[in-house]
Image: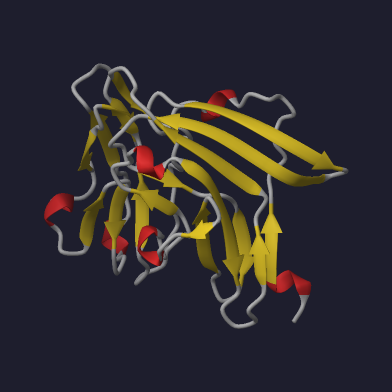
Amino acid sequence: MQPSALGVHFERSPESAVAPKAMRWCLNVKQWRQIAWNGNFVILVIDLVMVANLNICHRRCGSVTSNPPAIWSFYRNGEKLPQTEMLPLNGALVLNTVTAKDSGNYTCSAMNPITGMEVKLPQRIDLRVDYTDRNPPYFLIPPVNQITARPGDTVVLECPGVGSPPPAAVWSSPNIMNINNNNRTRLLPYGLQITDVMPEDQGSYVCRLDNGIAPALVHT
């Protein structure tokens, strides 16, 4: 096996201890990032995330290149989480309606299912779930605004905003009729899933997150 069969790619993070653009994702979130460097390589990344109860937390801890696609594992305080809390499409971790029991230190690994080669990623997420005052919806990291797919693919248009109270999402499209009454679409807590993608699915989609506290959050 060649080392590149399962490679890990990291984006260089700013050396500042604060990540300003990462402060609004899991509701009124305060997030600090500590980075340890060894030459040009990140050897440890620690994110401290503070989030209110009952939100849906959608989190990735890095990216890898693997053929076939990697099998992801997440760990909380060193104990492996069940695969039911994983997203098979992109290896993200989804914590539904978080409570104090979800607080802890999260790490992850990726394994090539053919070779068995496993990579433990350096990022650690210190999640703390606690009471938070009422706030409008926010994103920690803005979702992508363009997705390319092939006919027959399954895609997820992500809109993982949160708030206090947790917001509800309403999807619409100026190009596509009845996207909420299509048997190929499914509303997820963190986005809109489209299965068996067809050419007629191409177009613009709008996600509006509202929890009754202005302003609502709109993503297109």
Residue that sits furthest to the right in the current view: 39
Query: At x 30% / y 21%, what residue is drawn?
Result: 136
Count the marks: how many? 0
Position of 101 compared to 169: left or right? right
Location of residue 65 with respect to 39 vertically, above or below: below
Is residue 13 visible to the viewer in this orientation of the structure? yes
**Which quarter shows the N terminus?**
bottom right
Location of residue 89 with respect to 37 vertically, above or below: below
Location of residue 20 with respect to 170 vertically, above or below: above
Position of 205 compared to 180: left or right? right
Position of 126 compared to 57: left or right? right
The spot of residue 60 in percent (x, y) is: 51, 49
**Which quarter shows the C terminus?**
top left
The spot of residue 177 in percent (x, y) is: 15, 50
Q: Quadrant of residue 186?
A: bottom left
**Looking at this view, is 218 or 48 the one in front?**
48
